[in-house]
Image (tube, grey):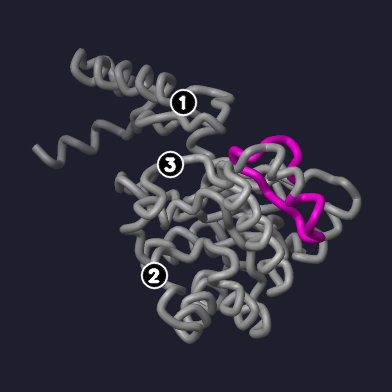
């Protein structure tokens, strides 16, 4: 059985930290799943770290469904959460329901994530009523990056902090099973965590959240464009990959690869018939 929303809620009640990582392909999902990470997010961050877009805004439903299908095939125990891309749930509740259902029905995800608080609460309620678990996302919501004027910490003023608390409470009341807090001051994130009954999962929101999420490429050091302040590189794969590619390139140029070990033999007498 895969991890369920009930188990995620129980983690908060037991004081057990919730771990979530992104994955965008079969192989990575399989490794993350084998380690035991309970939640895998197929984030629209793939637009930047996989597809090379400048932001998450250009990401399409087709791209998200494609990658979600691969992750679902690789993960057998973790709950796979599909990230609703820009403008796939904004225009109407009908659009939101239709596109959320595609993640479940076509891609095989077990839940969806969308950005926003009070403004999307009614849509969250309707999606949940249709039997689709929803994870919320407030604070720095990358799909609204133009409105924010860049990647900036959210909730630093009393008014902004109050709005974030109201957003979290609205998502809880709408039936969301968890909420991501992104780039929020740690004391505010801790307060929100105390005020709501559903798990908070932080990314740049301090240790006081119920859990943490990171982009797998940041954890592995495989995205070289920039390293967010909230990220910790546990390894630097870019250097390891570059070294391997340099060695391969050099051996091919020098004629030292492949060797007999990487080649296949045959009875060469059979070649006489070809002469």
Label 1 with label 3: CB-CB less than 8 Å: no
Between circles 2 and 3, the one closer to the viewer is 3
| Coordinates of residue 227 in the picture (x, y in percent) | 45, 29
In 3D space, how far apart are the residues under numbered discs 1 and 3 (Cα atoms)?
Answer: 25 Å
How many neighbours does mark 2 have within 10 angstroms: few (below 14), some (14-19), or many (20 or more)?
A: some
| Coordinates of residue 131 in the picture (x, y in percent) | 67, 81
Please tell me which residue lies in front, 47 or 230: 230
The quadrant holding residue 207 is top right
Relative to residue 193, is residue 172 depicted above or below?
below
Please tell me which residue lies in front, 233 or 237: 233
Q: Which residue is mark 3?
A: 151
The quadrant holding residue 41 is bottom right
| Coordinates of residue 151 in the picture (x, y in percent) | 43, 41
At horizontal 83% and vertical 53% (from top left) the residue drawn is 12
Span of residues in magenta: 192-209
Residue at disc 1, secondary structure: helix
Q: Which residue is mark 2?
A: 87
How many neighbours does mark 1 have within 10 angstroms: few (below 14), some (14-19), or many (20 or more)?
A: some
Residue at disc 2, secondary structure: loop
Quadrant assignment for the N terminus: bottom right
Q: Is residue 193 magenta?
A: yes
Q: Earlier in the sequence, mark 1 or mark 3?
A: 3
């Amino acid at each position: 059985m895969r991890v369920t929303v009930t188990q995620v809620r129980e983690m908060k009640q037991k004081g057990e930290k919730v771990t979530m990582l992104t994955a965008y392909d079969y192989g990575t999902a399989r490794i993350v799943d084998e380690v035991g990470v309970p939640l895998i997010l197929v984030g629209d961050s793939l637009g930047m770290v996989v597809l090379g877009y400048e932001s998450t805004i250009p990401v399409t439903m087709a791209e998200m469904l494609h990658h979600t299908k691969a992750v679902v095939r690789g993960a057998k125990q973790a709950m796979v959460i599909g990230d609703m891309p820009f403008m796939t749930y904004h225009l109407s509740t009908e659009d939101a329901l239709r596109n959320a259902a595609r993640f479940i029905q076509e891609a095989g995800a077990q839940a969806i994530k969308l950005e926003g608080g009070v403004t999307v609460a009614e849509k969250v309620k309707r999606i949940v009523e249709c039997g689709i678990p929803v994870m919320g996302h407030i604070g720095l919501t990358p799909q609204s990056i133009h409105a924010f004027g860049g990647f900036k910490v959210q909730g630093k003023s009393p008014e902004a902090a109050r709005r974030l608390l109201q957003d979290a409470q609205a998502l809880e009341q709408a039936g969301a099973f968890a909420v991501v807090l992104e780039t929020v001051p740690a004391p505010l994130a801790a307060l929100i965590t105390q005020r709501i009954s559903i798990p908070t999962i932080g990314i740049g929101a301090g240790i006081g959240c119920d859990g943490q999420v990171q982009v797998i490429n940041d954890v592995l050091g495989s995205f070289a464009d920039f390293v967010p302040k909230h990220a910790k590189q546990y390894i630097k794969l870019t250097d390891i990959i570059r070294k391997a590619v340099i060695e391969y390139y050099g051996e091919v140029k020098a004629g030292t690869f492949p060797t007999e070990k990487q080649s296949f033999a045959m009875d060469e007498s059979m070649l006489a018939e070809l002469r």
